[in-house]
Image (cartoon, grey):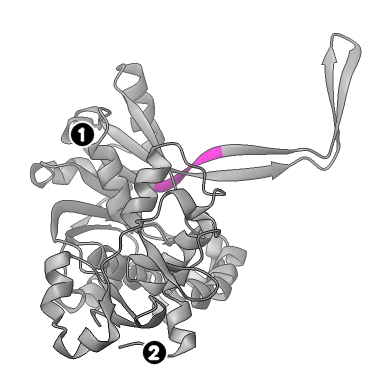
Amino acid sequence: MIRTKKEIEKLIALPNETIKVCMVKIGKNKKGSLIIVDEAGYLLGSLSDGDIRRAILGGKLIEEEISTIYNKEPIKHFAHEIDAFSFDILQDKKITILPIVNESNILIGIQTDEKGHHFEPISNYVVLMVGGEGLRLGDLTKNTPKPLLVVGEKPILQIILERLELFGFRNIILCTGYLSKSIEDFCGNGTKFGLNISYYKEKKKLGTIGAVKNIEKVLQEPFLVMNGDLLTGLNFKNILDFHNSRTGIMTIGCKNFTSKIPYGVLETEGTVVNRILEKPSYVYRVSGGIYVLNQECLKFIPKNKYFDITDLMEQILISKNILNAFPIEEYWLDIGMPNDYLQANVDYNNLF
């Protein structure tokens, strides 16, 4: 049982903390939830990543407090009951942390499942695009494929695979190309990650989605497609659940990108200036390199021809099918440039 203040702080939150802050805490503690207490340590409730997802889908902003979304009736144990505690209760109740309180309902400890958040295994495939040369990273990728560059203490690809396994995914296909043998030697059949890994090697460059056409026979259920160079705190199951709750045939994980104009911007009508904006910032939603596709999407991809994910999006829009956007509010970084790689190493210890 966890009793030290330092360890307990990783698993608790105050009711006036924001959804965004709690998302970061949940991403770091790898338990999928938090215990909510007041300043005195009085137990108030619990908050799961599912509670947060439902709140965001319901229109809540991540800057809002969690006070209206956390569960006010948490499962708990009193200190005198802990000797009779069984880990079966955690499994039966499908929880990963159990608050232990005294007779005054003050939190004195937290019982954990010791193995992290247990998500039910998911049969849906994840296709990781790991065949690029990573030319923008210069000498870093001269002899090492970009997905095997080490961030913190692990290759980027290992971080992604471990997080996919954490959230229940088991079936992974790696679409390789550049230095493919290095990736195959490192990942093997996936058993060391608790995964089933298979491969499709591009014989020629097929773009950011073209290779997926050649594995369509196994992609019967909605499946994830991801770039193999992303560092993110996203719960990947959330984007799959979001997609399954919508009618569209494709979902794009998107991230807000802020562009700051270093000049005074004039809003004009003809030659008349109506308004001056001093160095304004504009926010755009950009594709985050994480997608969920229905099998139906594959009919738009030509076989053995260069085809980018943006080409697929255009074809879906032209066909009048629905294309959904899933907001990635968690930490996200595309490791495309040397400065991005340096930043990933700075961020790693605070995130994973």
Residue 329 lies left or right of residue 174; in this view the side is right
Residue 145 in sight here: no
Check the image and report above or below for 96 versus 287.
below
Q: Which residue lies furthest to the top in this view?
A: 270
In the figure, 249 relative to 128: above or below?
above
Judged by depth in the image, the label closer to the viewer, 1 or 2, is: 2
**184 or 79: nearer the viewer:** 79
Q: In this view, does 335 lie to the left or right of 132?
A: right
Image quadrant of residue 243? top left
Q: Position of residue 143 (x, y in %)?
A: 42, 74
Disc 1 from disc 2: Cα separation: 52 Å
Q: Quick check: marks 1 and 2 in contact, CB under 8 Å? A: no
Residue 219, magenta (yes or no): no
For the point 50% across and 78% down, the residue is: 349
> What kind of residue is marked 2?
Arg
Q: Which of 242 and 22 is in front in this view?
A: 22
Residue 158 or residue 102, whichever sits in front: 102
Residue at 52% over, 48% down: 62
What residue is rendered at 59% in x and 37% in y? 284
Q: List x then y, in percent, for residue 193.
A: 21, 75
Where the C terminus falls, by quadrant?
bottom left
Q: Which labelled disc corresponds to residue 298?
A: 1
Query: Where is residue 50 drawn, in percent x and y?
Result: 31, 53
The residue range painted magenta reads: 285-289
Q: Is residue 96 left or right of residue 196?
A: right
**Mark 2 lies on residue:** 3
Outermost residue to the right:
272
The picture places residue 25, in percent across and down from the top left corner, at: 46, 68
Mark 2: give few (<14), some (14-19) or many (20+) Cα within 10 Å: few
Q: Is mark 2 on a helix, strand or loop?
A: loop
| Mark 1: few/some/many CA within 10 Å (<14, 14-19, 20+) | some
